[in-house]
Image (cartoon, coloured by chain):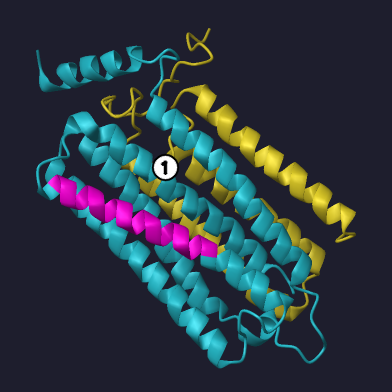
Amino acid sequence: MSTATPDTPNTAHGADGHSAAGGHAHPSNWLYVKVAIALALLTAFEVFTYFETVHGWGDNAIIVMLVAMMVLKFFLVVAFFMHLKFDAPIFWRLFVFGLILAMAVYMVMLTAFRYW
Amino acid sequence: MTDTAAAEVAALSEDHRTSTGISNEKLAMWLFLGSECLLFGGLISTYMFNKGRIGPDDIGPDDVFDIPFTSVSSFVLLMSSLTMVFAVSSIAKGDLRRNRIWLAATAALGATFVAGQVYEFTAFYSEGLGFTTNLFGSSFYALTGFHGAHVTIGIIMLMSLFVMSVRGNLSRERAETVEIIGLYWHFVDVVWIVIFTIVYLFPQ
């Protein structure tokens, strides 16, 4: 059973045990490097799909792939580099609330202007 | 009491001074970043709406974008997030020398990105795409210009931290300050991840 309350930090797996900065554990530098490698590979594949468009891939397939990779990169940076995975859940909720609100407002706006 | 234990006690004491049990400064930064989602959401959706609203002979995205160049810029900004987490990690361990190195490296990578953006804007302008040329130009420059301004503000904050550190005003006890600036820096990186995909890579 988890001992974390809604506003207390999670425990970092593989952390180096330091908690002086902001009262939560920091992951190891090797984990950061692995995340950076994943981000670089995803970016390389994103750019590859741009050039592959020339060879006749369908636009819808390209867009779905690009959005999936964008969301994955977004999650990796926010969860690991911004420490949301290891920090107090209230921060995660605040950020996701702003994000969902922004997406909802502008999806409605684009729909109202018949963008789709 | 060891240095590590003393720092942990100091961090806990800091947290207990707030009514929520968490740092007010960090809470304020996350609230600010949540509101920034609305700003950039507005700019991105405006770009999406306007990019196709150009005449058949107007200059458009396919005429000006240089994807290999922008891909390198994007990679530079992504790697600046790695150096930023190293800066946060090193000050949390009390390693001030490495903290200064990583702060300077992050600022340098950010400056490289901004320089690339200035070059890109100059190239686009010389090809005939000004801010008022058409709706695509206006929304493109507004979106990427706002992002570039955010990166520039981030560089100024990083250099301020660097100067504070050199003057001896940045110690392990103020590690959270570096972490909060880091949150802002990672956010501009995250925004660029979205801009790069939607503006540059989506099929036009």
Identified at 23% across, 33% down, the residue is: B174
Screen quadrant of the C terminus of chain B: bottom right
Judging by the rendered image, the residue that carries numbered circle 1 is: B183
Q: Main secondary structure of the magenta part?
A: helix
Q: Mark 1: which amino acid?
A: Leu
Task: Specify start and end residues of the magenta stretch as a single range.
Answer: B146-165
Evaluate whether residue A35 shows in this view.
no
Label 1: chain letter = B
Q: Which x, y percent locates residue B39? A: 61, 51
Question: Can you tell which quarter of the image residue B75 is in?
Answer: bottom left
Where residue B154 appears, as percent x and y from the top left, is 37, 54
Looking at the image, is B27 positioned above or below residue B104?
above
Q: Secondary structure at mark 1?
A: helix
Q: Quadrant of residue A28?
A: top left
In the displayed structure, B118 sits above or below B97; it is below
Q: Which chain is cyan?
A: B
**Pick the front one: B51 or B132:** B132
Q: Residue furthest front?
A: B132
